[in-house]
């Protein structure tokens, strides 16, 4: 079993890459709006900081953006083939901790993959 933490997942989101990824699933105007909301100057007392890298927590779309970015990270870590084997076909998705048959289960060393926000758990053969 491997346990890891994706450190500072919120702070390490590149806004330009995020905009390109959001355009794949939402309207391009909405994707531009969501990414532009994170690229703003933040003023506190006499200090001014322009955020150009990372997600500002508490914005309207920040929870959706973090979940979507987490999905992209999951696909990058697992690979498209194993991710589709773990999920099952779209018309009949797999139940939790089950595969379609024994051959698919034993084909790859990863048996279980679980990510909770930024904590990652992978069970190997």
Image (tube, grey):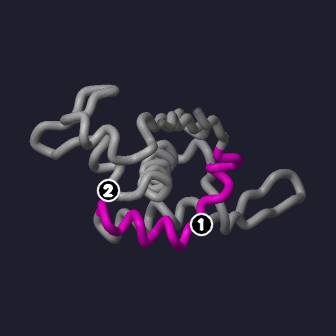
Crowd around label 1: few <14 · some 14–19 · many ≥20 (10 Å):
some
Q: Quadrant of residue 32?
A: bottom left
Q: From which residue to which does the magenta span run?
A: 6-26
Residue 54 in sight from this viewpoint: yes
- The one of 88 and 26 positioned closer to us in this rendering: 88
Residue 48 is situated, as x and y percent measured from the top left of the image, at 81, 63
- The one of 64 and 69 positioned closer to us in this rendering: 69
The disc at residue 14 is 1
> Is 3 a magenta residue?
no
Residue 41 is situated, as x and y percent measured from the top left of the image, at 70, 64
User: Is residue 85 toward the left or the right of residue 34 in the image?
Assistant: left
Residue 95 is situated, as x and y percent measured from the top left of the image, at 24, 27
User: Is residue 68 toward the left or the right of residue 27 in the image?
Assistant: right
Residue 60 in sight from this viewpoint: no
User: Is residue 29 toward the left or the right of residue 121 in the image?
Assistant: left
> Is 14 a magenta residue?
yes
Task: Report the residue marked by disc 2.
Answer: 81
Q: Earlier in the sequence, mark 1 or mark 2?
A: 1
Question: What residue is drawn where x is 65% and y is 40%?
Answer: 4
- The one of 36 and 85 positioned closer to us in this rendering: 85
The N terminus: image quadrant: top right
- In this rendering, the answer to whether 65 lies above or below 15 is above
Question: What residue is drawn where x is 41% and y is 66%?
Answer: 21
């Amino acid at each position: 079993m491997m346990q890891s933490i994706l450190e500072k997942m919120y702070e390490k989101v590149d806004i330009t890459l995020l905009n390109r990824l959001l355009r794949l699933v939402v309207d391009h105007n909405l994707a531009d709006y969501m990414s532009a909301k994170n690229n703003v100057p933040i003023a506190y007392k006499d200090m001014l900081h322009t955020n150009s890298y990372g997600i500002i927590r508490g914005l309207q779309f920040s929870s959706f953006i973090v979940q979507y970015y987490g999905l992209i990270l999951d696909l990058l870590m697992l690979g498209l083939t194993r991710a589709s084997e773990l999920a099952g076909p779209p018309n009949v998705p797999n139940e939790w901790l089950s595969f379609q048959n024994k051959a698919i289960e034993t084909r790859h060393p990863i048996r279980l993959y679980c990510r909770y926000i930024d904590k990652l758990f992978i069970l190997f053969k």
